Amino acid sequence: MTYMKQNIVIWALNYSRNRNYFSMALDAIDQSILRILQKDALAKLKDISAEINLSLSPTHDRIKRLEQEGYILQYVALLDRKKIDLGLVVHCQVTLDKQTKSHFSEFEQTIAQFPEVIACSLVSGNFDYYLKLVTKDVETYNKFYQEKLAVLPMVAHISSLFVMDEIKTTTALPL
């Protein structure tokens, strides 16, 4: 394969779990497009094209393909939580009383209904779930804790960590 150079893209088929078709691997141009859109989802096609040194039509086609193949899941607006009166961030470590499939499933279905919970991860270690919540203040969190989280029958232990200052918060994935 001596005819290949560094700037030639080798397309490999990767099965996409969320789609019923195969998708192509990302090349350097696709990655550049994704970096730009992570910084500004409203970036103009003209500006993206200029930055990646590609004409409008192929740039548009690449963005559409990235959307269709599930690399771009959705476009969202990032809100200033303090301006909408959600000044407190709390991380919770939750341990279930029994580590059974039914308890995991029931907990996950219930926690998905709580708008205060903005992230929930099943983890390994000394507890089962790691939650990230936003609330107005400690009193609002305490009400959530007492009336929603602690009353779940499968929950054995909750440890709450109150964020004093956010040093780094980003939604951009490293590409």
Image (tube, rainbow, N blue to C red):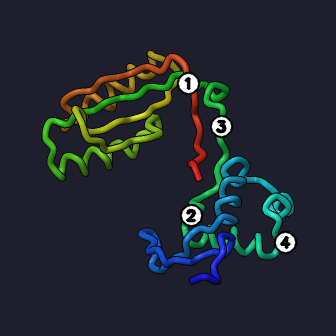
Q: Earlier in the sequence, mark 2 or mark 4?
A: 4
Q: Earlier in the sequence, mark 1 or mark 4?
A: 4
Kindly identify which numbered label has been placed on residue 71.
2
Between marks 2 and 4 in the image, the one whose residue lies nearer the viewer: 4
Q: Where is mark 4, residue-wise? A: 55
Left or right placement of residue 163 versus residue 33 in this view: left
Q: Could you say where residue 126 lies in the image, as x and y percent from the top left?
A: 22, 32
Q: Where is mark 1, residue-wise? A: 166
Q: Could you say where residue 84 lies in the image, as x and y percent from the top left?
A: 64, 29
Q: Could you say where residue 142 lies in the image, as x and y percent from the top left?
A: 38, 19
Name the image quarter holding residue 66. Answer: bottom right
Between marks 4 and 3 in the image, the one whose residue lies nearer the viewer: 4
- Marks 4 & 3, CB-CB < 8 Å contact: no
Mark pair 1, 4: CA separation: 40 Å
Left or right placement of residue 172 versus residue 102 in this view: right
Question: Which corner quadrant holds the N terminus?
Answer: bottom right
Mark pair 3, 2: CA separation: 22 Å
Q: Earlier in the sequence, mark 4 or mark 3?
A: 4
Mark pair 2, 4: CA separation: 21 Å
Mark pair 4, 3: CA separation: 32 Å
What amino acid type should be assigned to the residue bearing mark 1? Glu
Q: Earlier in the sequence, mark 3 or mark 2?
A: 2
Label 4 residue SS? loop
Mark pair 1, 2: CA separation: 28 Å
Which residue corresponds to the image point at 31% horizontal and 47% vertical from the top-left? 108
Q: For the residue carrying disc 4, how many other residues have a C-alpha within 10 Å: few (<14), some (14-19), or many (20+)? A: few
